[in-house]
Image (cartoon, coloured by chain):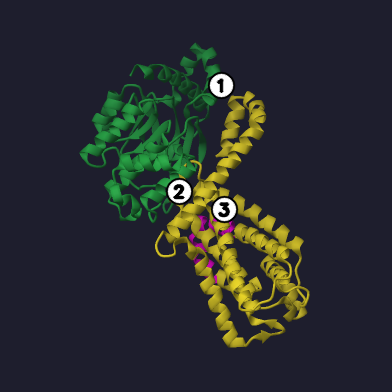
């Protein structure tokens, strides 16, 4: 995991710089702020090394990084405005794997959708310096249910500018759906659907993967194959992993973001984050 | 979103401006290429997901409107005889119903686009606007091809004459697509924003039917009626289309510039409404 160290260190510095901007501008404090929250910390840190912080934005916008800055998302609901995310800031360097932890309804999926550009934030912005996969989730978004797996593959290849034949070969080989690849996706079981979705994202070969709780899907053999592909061959790609599975998070992630009532905190100590999450 | 990013850039990085200018043109070209690639993929996908590969497959894209237009031609011929007010009923029905079909399909597909295609937004380079543009283009092409098929068949069997001015017809078709597309974008955004609009859409669309000019020539109307219906750009498009088809044998009332300007305005409003609706969109 040594390749993670350098980008992680850089990212930390960038995070602080973003943090200083945030610290002066956060006005809404509806939720109790988690102790030592990342977005509010750091005025001392920044005074200590101003030179490096000044250099950060240049790095941030020119190099491969995903930067999430003061992300706010609220929905108009029956019972008034619901603020799901309330000022989330963090960033991901190349190859970094971050776990997102939080209770059901804490806003994990919303965060992933905003980062993937599926929905637009109410305020704040996401800078995407890497090629990002679409969020892999149980809803099976990104595929068209009435089309066959094969036509879906062709569509993905066209949208992401990949050679169509090679993509089909890869997907057929990876998903192992056999003749069912020629049937409409709405006839698939949920396991088969996830196989196809996984194969499609692998075929495009993104620099950053967004995975929303679907890592535990499929039979044992396919799970192994997915892990092999995601963490073995594509060990260089960054990842945002929403998971409730302690073992997976501990094994693969170098950082963990804990979400609570729309606020977030990033931990470098994954084990500590998991313990905290279990007490939420 | 773009706005926020730009503000962010300017605040943090003043150098970004200069750099962006330098790369501007090349960026624009490559983005345009990407945009076209995405829209093309969406059009193919639209075709495949609607009609699949069963029986005649995507040819239904043309077959569906042909059945409708053909049915109407037969029906009207039975009801009204062969000639009415000096225009053959077949010509009248063919021109009227092709335009009407285009208008109705544009609106209904535009309004449903946001609801039915949200799954597509999972792909970062597919935006709401792309999905609607793809549908509008698809509708324009497919309805035109079915008009062409009907026309060729009817021409072979001698029911219609050679068209007088294809260019005028094509312009009318394109501007109708622009105006209808703008209206579809507006309504699509409004439907997303409010349920009430969605409920009202059906009756409102029904009442716009006489305002498309498909069921009469403006020439047949009294002066006051003329002035009223000519407020609606759809009537201009319809008259222009028929003028191109029939020629100066009959009198047609239309103003190409009025149609063009209202198309631009409706597209402009449509784009901003969609931009607004996109921010509010909740993707399942």
Q: How far apart are marks 3 and 2 (CA)?
A: 14 Å
Question: Callout 2: helix, strand or loop?
Answer: helix
Q: Is residue B145 above or below residue A197?
A: below
Task: Compare marks 3 and 2 and give the one earlier in the sequence.
Answer: 2
User: For this view, does B233 lie left or right of residue A195?
Assistant: right
Checking the image for residue B133, the label placed there is: 3
Give the residue at the far front of this rendering: B156
Q: Count neighbours of disc 1 (C-alpha within 10 A) and say few if under 14, some if 14 to 19, many if 20 or more.
A: some
The one of A36 and B102 positioned closer to us in this rendering: B102
For the residue labelled by badge 3, is the local secondary structure a helix, a strand or a loop?
A: helix
Residue A58 tag number: 1
Q: Is residue B137 left or right of residue A157?
A: right
Which numbered marker is on residue B120? 2
Do callouts 1 and 3 point to residues on the same chain?
Answer: no
Q: Which of marks 2 and 1 is in front?
A: 2
Chain ID, yellow in image: B
Q: Please, which chain is the residue tagged with disc 2 on?
A: B
As measured in the structure, the alpha-carbon distance from the residue carrying label 2 to the one carrying label 1 is 33 Å
Q: The green chain is which one?
A: A
Q: Give the percent coordinates (x, y) of residue A239.
A: 38, 31
Question: Would residue A257 be visible to someone looking at this image?
Answer: no
Residue A97: x and y in percent read: 36, 27
Q: Give the residues drawn in magenta, as a range.
A: B184-203
């Amino acid at each position: 995991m040594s390749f993670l160290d350098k980008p992680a260190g850089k990212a930390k510095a960038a995070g602080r710089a973003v943090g200083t901007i945030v610290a002066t501008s956060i006005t809404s404090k509806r939720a109790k702020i988690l102790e030592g929250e990342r977005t509010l910390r750091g005025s001392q840190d920044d005074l200590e090394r101003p030179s490096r912080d000044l250099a950060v934005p240049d790095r941030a916008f020119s190099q491969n990084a995903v930067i999430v800055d003061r992300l706010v998302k609220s929905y108009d609901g029956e019972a008034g405005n619901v603020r799901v995310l309330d000022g989330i800031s963090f960033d991901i360097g190349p190859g970094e794997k971050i776990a997102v932890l939080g209770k059901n309804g804490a806003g994990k999926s919303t965060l992933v959708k905003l980062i993937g550009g599926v929905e637009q934030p109410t305020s704040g912005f996401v800078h995407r310096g890497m090629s990002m996969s679409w969020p892999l989730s149980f809803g099976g978004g990104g595929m068209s249910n009435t089309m066959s797996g094969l036509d879906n593959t062709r569509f993905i290849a066209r949208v992401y500018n990949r050679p169509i034949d090679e993509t089909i070969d890869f997907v057929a080989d990876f998903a192992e759906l056999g003749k069912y690849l020629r049937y409409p996706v709405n006839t698939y079981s949920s396991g088969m659907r996830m196989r196809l979705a996984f194969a499609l994202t692998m075929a495009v070969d993104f620099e950053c993967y967004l995975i929303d709780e679907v890592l535990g899907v499929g039979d044992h053999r396919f799970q192994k194959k997915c892990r092999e592909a995601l963490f073995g061959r594509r060990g260089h790609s960054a990842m945002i992993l929403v998971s409730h599975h302690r073992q997976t998070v501990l094994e693969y992630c170098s950082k963990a973001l804990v979400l609570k009532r729309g606020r977030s905190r990033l931990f470098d100590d994954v084990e500590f984050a998991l313990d905290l999450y279990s007490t939420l | 979103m773009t706005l926020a990013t730009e503000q962010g850039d300017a605040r943090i990085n003043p150098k970004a401006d200069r750099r962006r200018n330098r790369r501007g043109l090349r960026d624009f070209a490559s983005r345009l290429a990407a945009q076209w690639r995405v829209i093309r993929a969406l059009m193919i996908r639209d075709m495949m997901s609607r009609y699949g590969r069963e029986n005649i497959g995507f040819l239904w894209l043309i077959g569906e409107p042909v059945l409708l237009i053909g049915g109407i031609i037969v029906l009207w011929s039975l009801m009204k005889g062969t000639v009415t007010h000096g225009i053959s009923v077949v010509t009248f029905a063919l021109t009227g119903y092709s335009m009407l079909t285009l208008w109705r399909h544009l609106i209904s597909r535009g309004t449903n686009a946001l609801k039915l295609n949200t799954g597509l937004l999972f792909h970062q380079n597919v935006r709401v606007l792309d999905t609607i543009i793809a549908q509008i283009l698809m509708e324009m092409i497919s309805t035109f091809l079915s008009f062409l098929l009907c026309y060729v068949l009817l021409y072979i069997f001698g029911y219609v004459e050679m068209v007088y001015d294809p260019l005028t017809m094509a312009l009318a078709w394109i501007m109708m697509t622009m105006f209808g597309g703008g209206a579809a974008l507006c309504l699509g955004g409004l439907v997303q924003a409010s349920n009430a609009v969605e409920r009202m859409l059906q009756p409102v669309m029904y009442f716009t039917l006489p305002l498309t000019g498909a069921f009469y020539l403006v020439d047949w109307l009294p002066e006051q009626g003329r002035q009223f219906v000519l407020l609606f750009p759809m009537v201009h498009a319809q008259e222009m289309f028929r003028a191109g088809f029939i020629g100066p044998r009959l009198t047609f009332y239309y103003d190409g510039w009025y149609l063009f300007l209202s198309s631009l305005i409706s597209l402009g409003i449509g784009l901003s409404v969609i931009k607004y609706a996109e921010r509010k969109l909740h993707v399942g």
